[in-house]
Amino acid sequence: MASSKGNVFESARIVSSESPEKASGVVELEPGLQLDFNNAFDVRNVQCPSHTTESALIRRIDLKVMPVLVIVYLLAFLDRVNISNALIFGLTTDLKLKGNQINIALTMFFVPYVLFEIPSNLLLKRLKPHVWLSICMFLFGLVMTLQGVVQNYSGLIATRFFLGLFEAGVFPGCFYLISTWYQRREAQKRYTIFFSSVTLAAAFGGLLASAIGKMNGIRGYSGWRYIFILEGILTCVFAVVVYFAVADFPEEAKWLTEEERGFIIARLKVDQGESGIEKKATFRDVLAVFKDYKIFIGGLMYMGLVVPIYSYSYFTPTIIKTYGYGNIQTQLHSVAPAAAAFVFALMIAYLSDRTRHRFAFVVICTIIAIVGTAVLLNVHRHPKTEYAMLFLIAMGTFSAAPVMVCWVTMNFEGHLKRSVGTAYLIGFGNIGGFIATFSFQTKDAPSYHTGYSVVMAFFCLTTVTSGLYFIAVRSQNKTIARQAVAETVPIDEPGEEQHMHSGFTYML
């Protein structure tokens, strides 16, 4: 980071054989007066290695970082929500579940999942991503396999608890790792591709369940048991691949040359400031992260989307079955809305990165989902219309979520703040999972008025809190700009992650 001898307006530029797009960092104080912080960092003439180009290097990073993380989260989310497919194939009957016992079993997953997000991200930083993620993946794959042989309600409760415990580190850990490789102006597409594992899991899960369900009766096992056993074994096997394939942080990337690694670290420093990866976090450092009130707004924003995400993921097959379809057709009809959501999310991500803006896209997507939910609240016994509205809900929900998470997490500066902040965001937001698992109950079928009302309320929560977050970061950008004019921007020593570095501005 720039020392106190540096001037906030000193130029810092990245030189490559191409002309990279100018990063977002222009703040308008008043009409006619703008400050451009894009080059405010004191890193002069950082040159891309002569044997490559910046875009070629980013493509290499994409191929190394993204595919394996997408598969990791696809399998994690598939293992988490495939119980919705198992319900269609007789889990409730075989385990003699009554009343809301299935809802309680779903809820049990979120108890350890919420509590262990922050400790897990701190462990990921200490043990290195390839080690921690592979351990987590093997363990939750093992638990999923064992879930296929449970004999009663107690066994189901136990496996759901440990599944939540071992999956706690995957989602925030992957998001955190992705954020350490990319500048903010190029992060949204990557976040959306990663988050789209959720929609791929929904689509792939339906197809896979429809095929595995045909094994019903083989060796005396019900189809739902094979869903858990086979998908769990697949996860355990891939965990071995993860150990060798996952890329660690840029500072530790041995698959890059020293020149390439230096260039990547420098371009990230221009955009995000010192990473502070070498600093060991103390309990006081962790608490200091929570002095920023915006982290709490972000938690509410994400919770507002978690309730619809899990409501859709857990109960869509059950809802579709009320439209009159059989078991296999129900699974197949769950694929199309998820596929549409995947395509729409990629379009939104492209536009968001293109415009270097987040707020408007979060609101547009939540409004689309609100429209679909409003129709389902008022239209009943019209299967085709109701099915069409599931498309709107899926498209709005699964497009808004990655934009919102990218917006908030990429506005955290430094490894510590991003690690703790991302874990808190995901952990607090997943409290919504407790609500989602009780929103759609059998007694409310087929209209599910209570469930859709709850989902509508949480869409509105995200819309309102997104507006508050936008106002907060816009106001803070203006404060930073005024301080810069007065040349009073505080310049921290390396590793001081709790404060914005000279020239840092929030993305809107």
Image (spheres, rainbow, N blue to C red):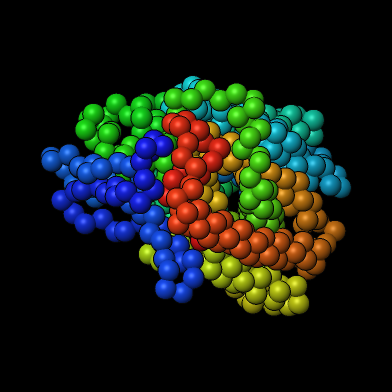
Q: Residue 482, how many percent across, how many down?
A: 50, 58
Q: Residue 198, how many percent across, how many down?
A: 53, 50
Image quadrant where residue 215 sits: top right
Quadrant holding the N terminus: top left
Q: Residue 176, how many percent across, how many down?
A: 49, 39
Q: Relative to the observer, which residue lies in front, 445 or 28?
A: 28
Q: Relative to the observer, which residue lies in front, 442 or 254?
A: 254
Residue at screen point 32% across, 48% down: 10
Asked if 350 appears above or below 222 in the picture, the reply is below
- Asked whether residue 451 is in view, the answer is yes
Q: Residue 497, how many percent across, how many down?
A: 51, 36
Residue found farthest to the front: 486
Residue at screen point 53% across, 68% down: 360
> Would residue 269 be found to the left or right of residue 493 on screen?
left
> Would residue 493 be found to the left or right of residue 78 on screen?
left
Image quadrant where residue 364 sits: bottom right
> Would residue 22 be found to the left or right of residue 360 on screen?
left
Residue at screen point 41% across, 66% down: 34
Residue at screen point 61% across, 63% down: 471
